């Protein structure tokens, strides 16, 4: 009985999840309405540019330029972030989103040196995958979108690795995704440990 309840946990969007989604939507609109503002919000693969604009290490994981990109990221974040917030707190969701996003951002210019790729990147994928993974650590058998949470993480890892192998130019994105997953894994185990302490 308990297992069935666990597997069918309901979605209840809270402040942390809703605020992050709202910020992403606002910045998406801004990027598509105001010309050239992306230069100050998106993350460059050039290390010198990142040093001049360090805030882009953060603004990038709230930024999307393409509609399908924000729908995919925020859709995934909605399903997993709302569940994570329900069993932890808005603060926990915000922290894992920020840490995973920042870790992913830091890898981008460094990996860009390896593949010698130039340009800018947009998207909250690393941050969102961190949230997905953190929830999956705490509730591995909960069914989300017709699949157990733990299988979602495995599928996302495989996708990130295969995309980097098949399309070498996407190595920087793949590494950022995997870094976000790793950050979520570590934070998820920490959250699980802390929650266990409260039960003792």
Image (spheres, rainbow, N blue to C red):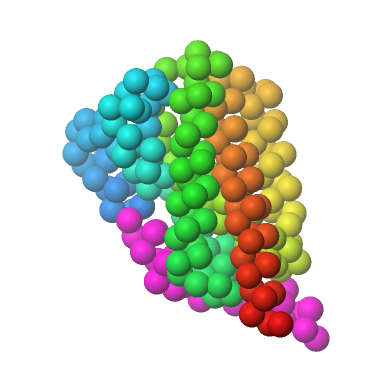
Where residue 8 sits, quadrant-wise, is bottom right
Answer left or right for 162 relative to 51.
Answer: right
Q: Is residue 69 visible?
A: no
Q: Could you tell whether 120 is left or right of 196 in the image?
A: left
Q: Residue 102 versus residue 149: which sits nearer the camera?
A: 102
Rendered image quadrant of residue 111: top right
Specify the farthest residue to the left: 34
Task: Reply yes or no: does residue 53 show up in magenta.
Answer: no
The residue under the point 73% across, 63% down is 140
Residue lying at 71% horizontally and 46% vertically, measured from the top left: 155
The answer, for residue 44, to whether it is visible in the render is yes
Residue 23, given in percent of the width and then of the height, sits at: 32, 56
The answer to whether residue 195 is above or below residue 104 is below
Residue 171 rendering spot, x and y as whole percentages? 59, 25
Q: Main secondary structure of the magenta part?
A: helix
Residue 31: x and y in percent read 27, 40
Residue 122, placed above or below residue 24: above
Q: Position of residue 105 (x, y in %)?
A: 46, 37
Q: Which residues are magenta?
A: 1-23
Q: Residue at x 64, y 61 (%)?
A: 190
| Residue 10 lies in the magenta stretch | yes
| Placement of the C terminus among the 4 image quadrants | bottom right
Q: Residue furthest bottom?
A: 1
The quadrant of the image that shows the N terminus is bottom right
């Amino acid at each position: 009985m308990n297992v069935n309840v666990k597997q069918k946990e309901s979605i209840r969007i809270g402040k942390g999840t809703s605020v992050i989604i709202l910020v992403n939507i606002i910045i998406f609109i801004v990027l598509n309405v105001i010309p050239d503002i992306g230069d100050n919000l998106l993350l460059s693969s050039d290390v010198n540019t990142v040093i001049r604009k360090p805030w882009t290490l953060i603004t990038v994981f709230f930024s999307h330029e393409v509609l399908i990109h924000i729908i995919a990221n925020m859709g995934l974040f909605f399903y997993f972030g709302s569940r994570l917030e329900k069993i932890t707190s808005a603060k926990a969701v915000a922290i894992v989103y920020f840490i995973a996003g920042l870790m992913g951002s830091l890898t981008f210019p460094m990996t860009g040196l390896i593949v010698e790729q130039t340009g800018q990147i947009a998207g909250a994928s690393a941050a969102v995958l961190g949230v997905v993974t953190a929830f999956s650590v705490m509730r591995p058998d909960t069914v989300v979108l017709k699949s157990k949470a733990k299988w979602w993480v495995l599928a996302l890892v495989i996708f990130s690795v295969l995309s980097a192998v098949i399309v070498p130019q996407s190595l920087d994105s793949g590494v950022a995704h995997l870094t976000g997953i790793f950050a979520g894994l570590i934070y998820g185990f920490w959250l699980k440990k802390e929650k266990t302490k409260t039960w003792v």
